[in-house]
Image (cartoon, rainbow, N blue to C red):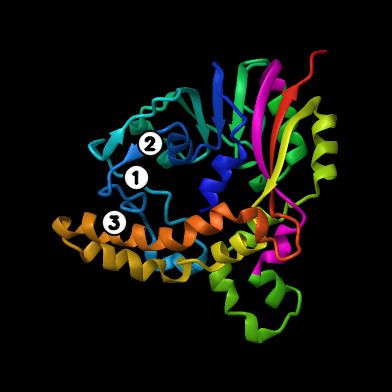
Amino acid sequence: MWRELDIRAMSQFEFTSPSCDIGCGDGMFSFLRAGGSVSNQFDAFRVISNLDKFFENVDIYDAYEKNDDSSIVIAPPGYQIDVAFDHKENLLKKAMWLNLYSEFKVGDANQSLPFPNESFNSLFSNIVYWLDNPELVMKEIARILRPGGRGCFMLPNRSLPDFSFYNQLYLKTGEKKWRFLEKLDRGRFSDNIRQARSGWEWELLFRNANLQVVNHKTYLSKTAIQIWDIGLRPLFPLLKKMADSISSRNYADIKSEWIDTIRLFIEPIIDMDDELGQGAEPAFHCYILEKKFS
């Protein structure tokens, strides 16, 4: 649901070569946005690790096992992205079989980006708010963009923290009866909600980095975030074990039924996202920025 709303929000952005996906992860988001498709046999969580430490905030997805690419039904017809950049080598290995990226580079976006000045015409990143210093990374992004080059970025709005059950019921009250919500949050609040800012705060940061706003959209209603905040997350370890126990013969059919059922509820919510704010500002910004000519 969230990823579909991301894709809709960034509809005005186009990759132009040379291009870079900063914090691409396993590449699946950009792959689907480019028009790629996978069969029902594909499972992004087929290979995981440390499932027994799920509620200890361990990253279970940072694992890799060589896999063939037979589950790809349609390779991306829309475009290719020149460089995939991420700090986790396992995720880049997962991205390699998508036939979307030409080059793969491991690096930490909390540090200076490992690219020469004015390397790219276009950049996409959905990780700026995960980083320690957004001011630094936006200046680095401006450095590696060519004059007139554009970047697209998803960034949390100031309203996002208020949509977190963990924040509202436990952190703000300090009442021990809500402590169980730590298992629901699994570190997300401290990791990716801490950088939430208003539109004018983000735009001041952009101006200081010599970047100007070309397009801005707010999205992700309070309703959508509250659904995501719980979702099926607490049940994931059990669901993973159940999925692994299904025979390969039945797997695709059962998965299709799951998808069809969930779509009955998720698709209307996606279509009505603008109407489901519950009186609060949307949780996220999508910015398309352009590097100014000197």
Lower position in the chain sequence, tag 1 or tag 2:
1
Q: In front: 271, or 157? A: 271
Q: CA distance from mark 1 to mark 2?
A: 7 Å
Disc 2 is placed on an element classified as helix
Name the amino acid type tagged 2.
Lys
The percent coordinates of residue 269 (x first, y second) are 55, 59
The percent coordinates of residue 74 (x first, y second) are 31, 32
Q: Which residue is mark 1?
A: 64
* Displayed quadrant of residue 18: top right
Q: Which residue is mark 2?
A: 93
Is residue 100 at least partly visible in the picture? yes
Number of callouts: 3
Q: Residues within 10 Å of mark 2 (few under 14, many from 20)?
A: some
Q: In front: 75, or 240? A: 75
**Residue depicted at 43% across the width and 66% down the height:** 53
Q: Which residue is mark 3?
A: 256
Left or right of residue 8, residue 80 in this image: left
Pointers 1 and 3 in contact (C-beta within 8 Å): no
Q: Residue 189 magenta-drawn?
A: no
Between marks 1 and 3 in the image, the one whose residue lies nearer the viewer? 3
Is residue 26 at least partly visible in the picture? no
Q: CA distance from mark 3 to mark 2?
A: 27 Å
The percent coordinates of residue 141 (x first, y second) are 69, 27
The answer to whether 182 is drawn above or below residue 209 in the figure is: below
The part of the chain drawn in magenta is: 143-164
The percent coordinates of residue 112 (x first, y second) are 67, 29
Pointers 1 and 2 in contact (C-beta within 8 Å): yes
**Residue depicted at 58% across the width and 25% down the height:** 14
